[in-house]
């Protein structure tokens, strides 16, 4: 695998992992406590697809087997009806996006950018990604064993991969939240022992964010 293919494979895998989160948690971000109390996995998935842009601040900690100290990063997710953008600001700026069937990556510090078809970088994962973003519960069940616990004040969703291609790298995803802060934590466990923890807080949502999304997409689509 060449450097560019390796970069896109890594980027696509990361977006595939986080798309699983947005599939289940996107609607929970805006659900009130009364709606939350009646939530089931099926009702969450049925209402997942965002109708507007949602801006989410994240703080990410990666516990890596090869590093003595955890890696820390932070930035924003922008989730919209046909894709999402991850804009990392710390420790250095990077931007990644999936929109429709296109995958984009830009690292200004290293002056590296790429854009292409998802199928070119990810094979069968592209089909799964599009199904997940559409809220296809049958496709989610095809790729993952699902455990959904809805308790009085907390909920926990665990996704365990079934497909060998994904299971080679991903052990499980645990998504959790409370009534007051519906989605506040994602834990991703990889088969090599690495662990990624992401803490989340919704900051804004609405059509006023369309300009920001358009600016980021224009930056990603630029030829440099």
Image (cartoon, rainbow, N blue to C red):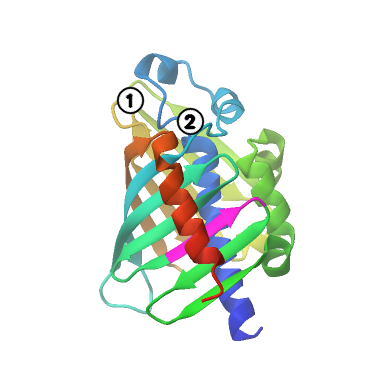
Looking at the image, which residue is at 39% across and 24% down?
Answer: 151
Tell me what residue is drawn at x 39 percent, y 14 percent. Answer: 34
The answer to whether the residue labelled 2 contacts the one labelled 1, judged by CB atoms less than 8 Å apart, is: no
Q: Is residue 216 above or below residue 53?
A: below
Quick one: quadrant of the N terminus?
bottom right
Instruction: Find residue 199 and report its horizontal and vertical position in percent.
Output: 31, 48
Magenta span: 95-100
Judged from the image, the secondary structure of the residue bearing numbered disc 2 is: loop
Disc sitting over residue 27 in the figure? 2
- Relative height, residue 15 to residue 83 (above, below): below
- Residue 164 coordinates in the image, percent (x, y): 69, 60
Report the side of 158 relative to 144 (left or right).
left
User: What SS does tag 1 mark?
Assistant: loop
What residue lies at 57% left-to-right and 23% top-to-bottom?
Answer: 43
Q: Is residue 139 magenta?
A: no
2 or 1: mark nearer the eye = 2
- Left or right relative to 52: residue 177: left
Q: Disc 1 designates what residue? A: 179
Residue 208 appears anywhere in the view? yes
**Residue 115 in the image, given as x and y percentages of width and height:** 61, 68
When the figure is inspected, residue 93 is found, relative to residue 135, above or below; the finding is: below
Toward the left, the furthest residue is 69
Task: Point out residue 153 in the picture as x, y percentages from the top left corner.
Answer: 32, 24
Is residue 191 visible in the rendered image? The answer is no
């Amino acid at each position: 695998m060449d450097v560019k293919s390796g970069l896109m494979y890594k980027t696509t895998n990361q977006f595939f992992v986080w798309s699983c989160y947005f599939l289940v948690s996107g609607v929970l971000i805006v659900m009130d406590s009364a709606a939350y109390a009646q939530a089931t996995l099926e009702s969450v998935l049925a209402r997942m697809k965002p109708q507007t842009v949602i801006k989410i601040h994240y703080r990410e900690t990666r516990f890596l087997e090869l590093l003595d100290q955890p890696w820390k990063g932070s930035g924003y997710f922008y989730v919209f009806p046909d894709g999402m953008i991850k804009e990392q600001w710390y420790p250095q700026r990077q931007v990644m996006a999936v929109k429709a069937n296109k995958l984009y990556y830009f690292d200004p510090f290293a002056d590296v950018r790429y854009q292409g078809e998802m199928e070119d970088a990810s094979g069968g994962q592209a089909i799964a990604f599009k199904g997940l973003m559409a809220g296809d519960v049958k496709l989610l069940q095809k790729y993952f064993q699902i455990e959904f616990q809805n308790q009085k004040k907390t909920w926990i969703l665990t996704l365990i991969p079934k497909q060998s291609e994904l299971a080679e790298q991903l052990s499980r995803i645990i998504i959790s939240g409370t009534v007051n802060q519906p989605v506040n934590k994602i834990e991703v466990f990889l088969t090599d022992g690495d662990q990624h923890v992401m803490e989340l807080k919704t900051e804004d949502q609405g059509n006023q964010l369309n300009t920001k999304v358009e600016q980021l997409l224009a930056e990603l689509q630029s030829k440099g």
